Image: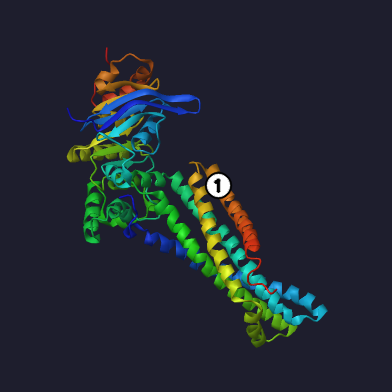
């Protein structure tokens, strides 16, 4: 058995007196595209931020590629961080840099490539996310919401990571843009053999992208499985989330069996 | 492996910060320096005239500006100008998750964001002190000539005699120390910003107020520590 790409064991998080997670376990295998869903305030984004090392859990541990995120010196931590890319909800592009420099940033950090190689790599990433070379000269403030996400995706993929983490990838995009962005992520994910973990509450995104769904409720991963399996679980949150009228429509559109009997 | 090699030093950021907080501050520090020089000289001249102690204008202007007013004025201007800008920049980077993005790429924010600002101000502030002090002295000299009919030549000749060079070194040292603290205070408050506008505005205010207070407290320490240096006994 391979080591899981992400393994979370017995994780507990507390905000003041409130426990957000309690004894949470999750293991994500290589090649899966996992959507993390849960009610608002259930700690989805918090969990994602812990996986990428921006927050520390109060208890429990998280391993990525079988290694802990912290410890072992800056060089090791850096090397591990180069193996995953993060797409933040609002893109988090460096506003002082042009699109080109944003995508080039992680490459320049490596100090392994000369400027010519970096130029070629950036152009390759731009075309991967279906942007044109001339877009490289724009500043983040001049981009539309959809383009910001594409550039952010290109930057997240700059170092050819094995794992991609997405925080609300389609939030703030209109349905059309959102569809094409989801298609792009799925295509790239399959082409590059990425493992993907995303936080979303958009059912269209979930249905189109995920091979598995992890439901975060009652402070733990309540269920983890394919969409089909999840929908057959009788739990108030899952019923509300997947079987409301709106959800049924969304799932029907995506060609999945909507109403389990 | 955790050592920082020279290649890791963020030279581009340092020079960008030097330009922004040093070169770009030259006009305003010159203007303020000149006016303060003129005003101080004018007011002193009015008093000195009554006692017939006209020539002491050089001592008052020289010591006051080189040792005290030059460094403190520049520090306050830079705290208001660059300190607030640094806090706001880091704060917005926090709000837009840019700092988080850096962290997930394994970039040390201390080295990349704080260090260049601190180095830039340590270098820029003494230079600005030198610049602004020179212009303030010119302002004082002009005013002394108009008010008391003290010639430029006399002013130039007397200045080095009544203001020992130690005072200039004290002024420059103050500049470097003030610069370091302004940058550290600004970065501290900038990284404390929570992702909302209220926090951004309150931290920017706190940054400027604290930086100016710290400068004045440090200046008091300097005054005590250097009380036996460079003053006519």
> Residue B85 location, x and y as percent?
51, 55
Q: Residue furthest top?
A: A261
Q: Residue at x 40, y 20 (%)?
A: A218
Q: Residue at x 21, y 56 (%)?
A: A120
Q: Mark 1 falls within which chain? A: B
Q: Residue at x 28, y 40 (%)?
A: A181
> Residue B146 location, x and y as percent?
71, 82
* Quarter assignment of residue A215: top left
Total number of numbered labels?
1
Relative to the observer, which residue lies in front, B143 or A198? B143
Locate the N terminus of chain A and report the quarter of the image it occupies: top left
Image-based side of B98 in relation to B148, left or right: left
* Quarter assignment of residue B223: bottom right
Tell me if I can see residue B172 in this picture. Answer: yes
Tell me if I can see residue A253 in this picture. Answer: no
Image-based side of A216 in relation to A154, left or right: right
Q: Which residue is mark 1?
A: B203
Query: Up-down: is A52 above or below B145?
Result: above
Relative to the observer, which residue lies in front, A56 or B209? A56
Query: Up-down: is B37 above or below A169?
Result: below
> Residue B72 location, x and y as percent?
61, 64
Locate the C terminus of chain A and report the quarter of the image it occupies: top left
Relative to the observer, which residue lies in front, A218 or A38? A218
Image-based side of A49 in relation to B204, left or right: left
Q: Secondary structure at mark 1?
A: helix
């Amino acid at each position: 058995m391979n080591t899981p790409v992400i393994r979370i064991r017995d994780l507990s998080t507390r905000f003041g007196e409130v426990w957000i997670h309690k004894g949470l376990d999750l293991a994500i295998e290589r090649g899966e595209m996992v959507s993390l869903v849960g009610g608002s305030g259930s700690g989805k984004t918090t969990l994602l931020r812990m996986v990428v090392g921006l927050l520390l859990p109060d208890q429990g541990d998280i391993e990525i590629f079988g290694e802990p995120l912290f410890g072992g010196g800056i060089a090791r931590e850096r090397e591990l961080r180069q193996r995953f890319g993060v797409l933040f909800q609002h893109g988090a592009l460096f506003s002082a840099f042009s699109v080109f420099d944003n995508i080039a940033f992680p490459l320049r950090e490596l100090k392994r490539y000369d400027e010519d190689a970096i130029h070629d790599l950036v152009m390759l990433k731009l075309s991967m996310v279906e942007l044109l070379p001339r877009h490289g000269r724009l500043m983040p403030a001049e981009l539309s919401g959809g383009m910001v996400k594409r550039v952010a995706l290109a930057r997240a993929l700059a170092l050819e990571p094995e794992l991609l983490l997405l925080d609300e990838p389609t939030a703030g995009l209109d349905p059309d843009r959102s569809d094409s962005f989801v298609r792009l992520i799925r295509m790239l994910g399959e082409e590059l053999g990425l493992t993907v973990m995303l936080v979303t509450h958009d059912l269209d995104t979930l249905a189109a992208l995920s091979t598995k769904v992890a439901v975060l409720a009652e402070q733990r991963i309540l269920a983890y499985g394919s969409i089909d399996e999840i929908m057959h679980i009788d739990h108030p949150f899952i019923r509300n989330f997947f079987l409301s009228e709106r959800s049924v429509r969304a799932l029907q559109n995506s060609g999945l069996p909507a109403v389990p009997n | 492996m955790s050592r920082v090699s020279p290649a890791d030093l963020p030279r581009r950021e340092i020079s960008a910060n030097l330009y922004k907080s040093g070169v770009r501050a030259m006009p305003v520090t010159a203007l303020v320096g000149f006016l303060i020089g003129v005003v101080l000289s004018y007011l002193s001249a009015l008093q000195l005239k009554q006692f017939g102690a006209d020539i002491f204008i050089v001592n008052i202007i020289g010591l006051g500006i080189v040792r005290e007013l030059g460094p403190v004025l520049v520090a306050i201007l830079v705290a208001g100008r660059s300190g607030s800008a640094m806090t706001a920049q880091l704060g917005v980077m926090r709000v837009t998750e840019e700092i988080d993005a850096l962290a997930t790429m394994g970039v040390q924010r201390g080295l990349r964001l704080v260090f260049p600002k601190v180095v830039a101000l340590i270098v820029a502030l003494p230079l600005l002190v030198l610049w602004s002090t020179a212009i303030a002295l010119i302002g004082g000299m002009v005013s002394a000539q108009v008010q008391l009919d003290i010639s430029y030549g006399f002013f130039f000749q007397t200045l080095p005699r009544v203001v020992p060079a130690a005072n200039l070194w004290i002024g420059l040292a103050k500049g470097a120390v003030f610069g370091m603290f302004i940058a550290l205070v600004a970065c501290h408050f900038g990284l404390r910003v929570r992702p909302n506008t209220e926090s951004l505005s309150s931290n920017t205010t706190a940054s400027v107020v604290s930086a100016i207070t710290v400068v004045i407290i440090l200046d008091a320490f300097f005054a005590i520590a250097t009380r036996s240096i460079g003053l006519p006994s």
